Image: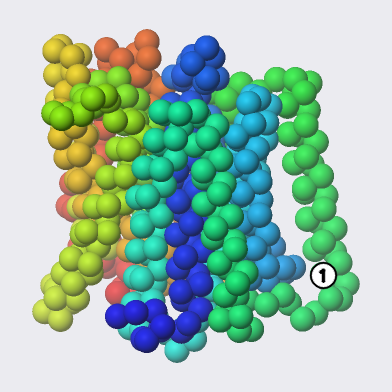
Amino acid sequence: MTPTAQHPHGLRTLFFTEMWERFSYYGMRALLVLFLVKAVNAGGLGFSDEVATAIYGLYVAGVYLAALPGGWIADRLLGAQRAVWVGGLLIAAGHFTLALPSSQSFFLGLVLIVLGTGLLKPNISALVGQLYPEGGARRDAGFTIFYMGINLGAAIGPLICGALGERVNWHYGFAAAGFGMVLGLVQFQLTRQRLGDIGRPPASRGTGTRRDWTVLTVALGLIAILVVTALAGVVKVNPLWLAKFTSGLIVTMAIAYFAWAFLFAHLSLTEKKRLVVIAILFAASAMFWAGYEQAGSSLTLFAERYTERILPGMSGAFPASWFQFVPPAFVILFAPVASALWLWLGRRGADPSLSAKLAGGLVLLALGFLVLALGAKRALANGPVWPTWLIATYLLHVFGELLVSPVGLSSVTKLAPPRLVGQMMGIWFLGTSLGNLIAGLFAGEVSGDNAAAMPARFLQVVLTAGGTGLLLLFFTKPVRKLMAGVE
């Protein structure tokens, strides 16, 4: 099946744009923590593990938070096509700014990438959906092809950027990520006509739109003031404190929103029951991504410091960042199998329920950390362990992702009251953002001076995630009742 033969021609444009954007994102992410902790005389920034992983958590959380205003900007001002273009330009500029040998330019680059990804990521997915106004199985197949483009870029990026960054110069790796985004932009512009009129800017340019531009200008001005004062040292920023504060703020916002919706949004009894399920989704998603996103932080540090990377026949160690090729490669390999399995089970009326899939994802996450805990104990006692420990962990986590990812956005849109769908989607992104923040904070507790605690802390994840998964499995029938009328 080719995009042009069975699908709209525009799918090819969006496939390669997203592939190159994910190349740049995951290529840079593979280097981020390693660069932050590397000593200054070795070209890095010399941060402690706790500070480095907190910065990592803030960065990846910021990407998901920025998707909320990014969607608003496209809907009200730019249109999805222009939002993708402007977002890509900001991302490329961010990566090239990272390539400059300065700590100030490095953090400015991170801000630019966050803003650009917030514009590009939600809106390119929206464009894919608009290519298939009829919906149905053809649309699902289109998103499957698009999803493969995401993982193809995510797999290639760490290999190229990681090799350049770790073996040649860190800033060359960041620059390579920028060139990847430029390639995506070039092909987007050359083939943009395939998209036709979908995602064009809003036709109206009335008072409301001028007001929206004013809001955007003020918001960007405030961001610029904060960034400039922080980079100039006028405002002192403690990444560890900021990550903890932001985590607490997100939890408070989520609790306040669910309380408001339950008590004051005039929901029916059925809608309130479904709201409880969305709250369960929020908590389970945050917990899952808090573990899964260790791939870019604690697992990367484990790969560099506690994993044997000189294999038979090799003259030197391969880059630690190359391990981040493994998860997307597993997704490419097993996603079609998982899709076929759900279809086969669905035809027999045996498709697992929402809570069963969430429970399975959390249990698989726990099993992955059980493998990692055993590997960490062995590494601390006997020295670096074979890569198979990390690879087995990634495999279990990817199996968990294939259970959790398909139920997220789809279930929220089905369960949310029609007038609150947009807000509920925002809550879903908040949960993912919270998980990423927790991932960064947790990573700082199992590395550096805290390395001796690795096995015990990983086992805590096993007990927490595994216990929650088993609890969800136990309550499968009650959760299904709360979802009455939603499949």
- Label 1: few (<14), some or many (≥20) within 10 Å? some
Q: In which quadrant of the rendered view does residue 143 lie?
A: bottom left
Q: Is residue 206 left or right of residue 313?
A: right
The image shows residue 190, relative to residue 382, as above or below, that is below
Q: Is residue 254 visible?
A: no
The image shows residue 96, relative to residue 334, as above or below, that is above
Q: Residue at x 42, y 28 (%)?
A: 166
Q: In which quadrant of the rendered view does residue 278 lie?
A: bottom left
**In the rendering, at what x and y percent does residue 125 appear?**
50, 67
Amino acid type for the residue under numbered disc 1: Thr
- To which residue does mark 1 refer? 209
Q: Residue at x 24, y 42 (%)?
A: 394
Residue lying furthest bottom in this view? 134
Closest to the observer, 60 or 367: 60
Q: Residue at x 48, y 57 (%)?
A: 20
Q: Residue at x 20, y 46 (%)?
A: 395
**In the rendering, at what x and y percent does residue 148 appear?**
35, 64
